[in-house]
Amino acid sequence: MTLAELAAAVEHRSSGRLAAKIEGERDRPIEAVAPLESARPSELSFLANVRYRGAVATTRAGAVVLTAADCAALRPAMSVVVCEQPYAWFAFAAQLLHRPAGRKPGIDPNACVDPAAKIGANVWIGPGAVIEAGAEVGAGASIEAGSYLGRDVRIGAGTRLYPGVRVQDGCSIGAHGIVHSGVVIGADGFGFAPFAGTWIKIPQTGRVVIGDDVEIGANTTIDRGAMGDTVIEDDVKIDNQVQVGHNCRIGAHTVISGCAGIAGSAIIGRHCQLGGASMINGHITLCDRVIVSGGTLISRSINEPGFYSAVFPFMTNRDWERNAAVVRHLRELRDRIRALERRLGSAPDIEDLEK
Amino acid sequence: MTLAELAAAVEHRSSGRLAAKIEGERDRPIEAVAPLESARPSELSFLANVRYRGAVATTRAGAVVLTAADCAALRPAMSVVVCEQPYAWFAFAAQLLHRPAGRKPGIDPNACVDPAAKIGANVWIGPGAVIEAGAEVGAGASIEAGSYLGRDVRIGAGTRLYPGVRVQDGCSIGAHGIVHSGVVIGADGFGFAPFAGTWIKIPQTGRVVIGDDVEIGANTTIDRGAMGDTVIEDDVKIDNQVQVGHNCRIGAHTVISGCAGIAGSAIIGRHCQLGGASMINGHITLCDRVIVSGGTLISRSINEPGFYSAVFPFMTNRDWERNAAVVRHLRELRDRIRALERRLGSAPDIEDLEK
Amino acid sequence: MTLAELAAAVEHRSSGRLAAKIEGERDRPIEAVAPLESARPSELSFLANVRYRGAVATTRAGAVVLTAADCAALRPAMSVVVCEQPYAWFAFAAQLLHRPAGRKPGIDPNACVDPAAKIGANVWIGPGAVIEAGAEVGAGASIEAGSYLGRDVRIGAGTRLYPGVRVQDGCSIGAHGIVHSGVVIGADGFGFAPFAGTWIKIPQTGRVVIGDDVEIGANTTIDRGAMGDTVIEDDVKIDNQVQVGHNCRIGAHTVISGCAGIAGSAIIGRHCQLGGASMINGHITLCDRVIVSGGTLISRSINEPGFYSAVFPFMTNRDWERNAAVVRHLRELRDRIRALERRLGSAPDIEDLEK
């Protein structure tokens, strides 16, 4: 593909919203994307981070995607795709240049597909995959080696399940999704009633319902609802090793980084961003456009969009020992400050520190 | 089943400990349980949370389980199961109404069962399951698609392994257990001796020994002991994505929420509750009835039953930046307060702050 | 094996670096290793922890490994292997006494091996394993039940993949590695460009490249690079449920405990130790020999070897509520101390507390 053809394809794929101007050789053939430092003349690169601006001068890439401002400032020697959203442009271009290795459609002879399952056109079902009665797999989907679809599971058109994904009875995944290896959709939520010193299991009779364009990272788990459903809306992106409890609802376009945990019945708004290893308590609500720092535990509902954090700052272990010991006595310290202020006749309104 | 039949069945199943009185139609047919807001006249519901009391007035549920006090206060229009432990009553009723979709017993032709394995009566072994020599599967157990039992593994009667569970050589699980997809029982513990700048593996020769009535959530891992065994006692309930290190012992009736981690050789008492993403350091002991908040790291043994916490409170990122910067200087702040107190002749006993 | 034969074998296996002197019966037959409290006369034990010194007097072990100093101080009744690195000596001895149950080499008839894969000599491929075209498995490796090797994957000589490991297209693992069940190597990194309120996937075109002598714990995930590779150097030991993001590099001899998370493009030095549930932010660098406490989040690069911590100290929930409330007001407290100091004419240089 030439640079000009690539630009036309990106414009088309973005429904005309990503037009670009090419400075330089429109006919340069582009085969792949690559980082600035290792790109070859047949490759397209991208200024991922302001820190790497120097690399634009030295890269051997055949072309680079830049904003008009960066292009004017850096005046690179190679061809430039000038565009106001270089990262999105680059993402579309990379998708066009790196199509996943397609599988010839078909059902591997070592797959176990129940005769009462409905398999759409152009579906690939890998060796060792098991598909139970009543399951439906949409056109162009792929259910790879060793994956499992329980009874009445629905997988949307074009969705890819990598090897070793398990989707339990009754759960559904929309179209154009990507589910990585080791994901478990629809295991029982964690619900028990205490009774005479033991735990009585609450049957988990809800489902997991996942929208379109959802990506779910390796070894992530999403539990089925206790009575109602667990819902993941469209275009949600979930990283690896994330836990989503029963009856959660995750709003559209929200991204959740690795190792995060969302306890049961939490409601997460749209366009939220949950950092790595962040934890959301159960039965609380986050409004739209909440951003949570990595490692932060959110213990109460948040009604204001914004950026929230709760991390103990790291330090040397020696400093930590000294400072952490004081954390155990903060209330006393506050009271001692107040006492000093009273002695000096400068005590502020005590209320300001309550809560 | 009519409401009266259901009440009789719950009473029987609870060994007579959960008697209930029915107010209203004893003969109303009940088919399922459902949340108050979506329940239909053929369904039973339950007041899960005081906040939802208003829903009792508007639900279309055919019956609801309430305490005598709630029943008197709310005076609902539909039939009521009056009972002093509504949650436990509801749990038993839900179990009776929602029996898991049973599998006809048998060994799927695509399973690989070593001739030297012992398979009990009425066992289901799914496609792709692998059972090695010496393994024993108790009556009525099910080993679902793609699960793996190593040599000499023992699975108790009635225990269900969902698709994709791995139990390594020599480990055992008791009766009536539930093990969700992706669980790994008996991987090697993490043990290495340092030697000349490299790490020498300590062979992990112990086992994992799991009691009766244990439930283990999806993608949880429980390592085998280094020399002795890792032990999970009866009626322990473990959520998803939990890590239990080698040589831990988890006491009976303890519940562990998702993403928690328990380092090697930790001993957890009975009737404990470990919150989501809590972490227990290695080689420490928690006595019975310890409750640990979500996100809390327990670094020392606890000898007093009680509720323990350690979470940095969340706030806006801007406030966090300001406050966290001070955390690095708490010791200095304390010293400055002390200096002020000395100047004013009011220094308290310094010992009170020395950890 | 007699004690003397064992000592000779350890010396040989350690290339002569672990010589030991035997006090007592050189001809005592030793069959296994065991903890001091349960060891029998045919077993070898080891003083793992100074706390257990008393057990040396009461153990029934046939022999024990001790330093010369401990031997002189404890004067045990049984045979002693006297050696300056007892833990390493014990590790080698345990490896010699507990060789993993070998599999007869071969390809199980229920495995699916593409004819275009290259399988070395003495390899075991278990039932349900799937090996795609172009994959190469080195001599003596074992790819156990239900494991998956994508196209062009390379597995080094003698490496063991336990049941249910997935290695995606193009990734490689060196020689003498151990990969536990549920591990996913080479799932897509988490990369999306924002565009018009939605997320555009960045194809993840890099690989995962893993060195020799690496052990990876159950259900750990290591993502492929976005453009360049994710690299795990030799002798790295990774525990269970660890997440390694795209384009990370983990230096040789580093150990990572369970539930840790390393965000994308982080560079970890050699000989580092990351504690359980520690979290490393993306795009930062840790120099060699950094030790991170369990539960600690590292948010900036570290250029000094040392021991770093960041944990909120645990306390009873009641104390925590009181102290945590003050954390939200630390900046104000600092300002109030400063105001008091000014009033008393003793304000220190304000700069000392900024940042």
Image (tube, coloured by chain):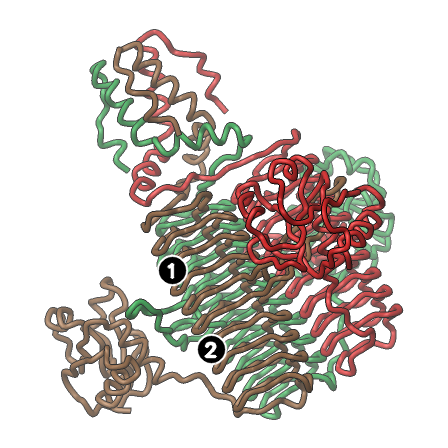
Chain colours: A red, B green, C brown
Residue B163, disc: none
At a point 30% along the width and 83% down the height, the residue shown is C13
Instruction: Kindly state the secondary structure of the residue where label 2 is placed.
Output: loop
Q: Quadrant of residue A209?
A: bottom right
Which kind of residue does numbered mark 2 sit on?
Ala
Q: Could you tell me which quadrant the C terminus of chain C lies in?
A: top left
Q: Residue furthest top?
A: A345
**B14 vs A172, nearest the viewer:** A172
At a point 64% along the width and 52% down the height, the residue shown is A45
- Label 1 lies in what chain? C
Q: Are marks 1 and 2 on the same chain?
A: yes
Residue C175, disc: 2
Which kind of residue does numbered mark 1 sit on?
Arg
Mark toward the start of the polypeptide (1 vs 2) = 2
**A216 vs C234, nearest the viewer:** C234
At a point 36% along the width and 53% down the height, the residue shown is C290
Gap between marks 1 and 2 measured at Cα: 19 Å
In screen coordinates, is C45 left or right of A210?
A: left
Q: Position of residue C140 (x, y in %)?
A: 50, 86
The residue identified by callout 1 is C270
